[in-house]
Image (cartoon, rainbow, N blue to C red):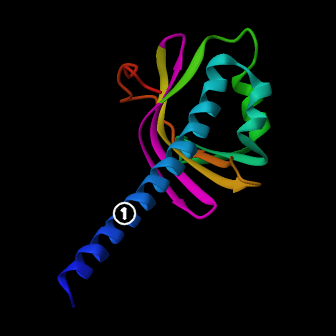
Amino acid sequence: MPRSFIVVLAAVSLGTSSWAMAQTQSAEAEVLGIVKAMLHVIETKDAASVAAHVDSTARFTLLRPTPTGGRVIVIAGTQFIDRVTQPGGPPAKELIRNPEVRIDGDLATVWTEYQFIIDGKVHHCGYDAFQLGRIGGAWKILNVSDSYREQGCGEPWPGGT
């Protein structure tokens, strides 16, 4: 095989790989942006804007510790948003860090550490698992599951999202 053909083939392969990587990074940024926008609703208490980010059928699956083992609480996404955006409640926000984004076609998952902050203090922490679907060309949150602990959370993270 001529050397020039191999060089051209390698260049085309690298160009295609770079293009695919850029497309993947763009989709990952878009998915993570939807998650961050939904979490911002907690801080701003703007429940009306959540419809743009959360599918109407979304569910929140909350794993909560009990003295005899874990308990599962499943609520509609709209119920969760109603709870965390109540006017007059204390200032609250959810910080995330070290997100891992995985995408296959129209399905995406974001796995990330979180801290839930109330009145400037860490109330609880754990891990969030967000599942999103690309519906009608737009990413929407379909499900959120989380773990929960009140000890070992540390101080609020600087620069947390």
- Along the viewing direction, whichever of 113 and 38 lies nearer the viewer: 38
Quarter of the image where one finds residue 50: top right
53 with respect to 93 (left or right): right
In the image, residue 97 lies in the stretch drawn in magenta: yes
In the image, residue 103 lies in the stretch drawn in magenta: yes
Q: Is residue 118 above or below residue 95?
A: above
Q: Is residue 25 above or below residue 107?
A: above
64 with respect to 85 (left or right): left
Mark 1 element type: helix
Query: Can see residue 40?
Result: yes
- Magenta span covers which residues? 96-120
Q: Amino acid at mark 1?
A: Gly
Find residue 11 and report its horizontal and vertical position in percent.
Answer: 30, 68
82 with respect to 44 (left or right): right
Find residue 133 and report its horizontal and vertical position in percent.
Answer: 67, 55
- Which residue was labeled with disc 1? 15
Split into 4 quadrants, where in the image is the N terminus? bottom left
Query: Can see residue 69?
Result: no
Rendered residue at 45%/61% (across/down): 20
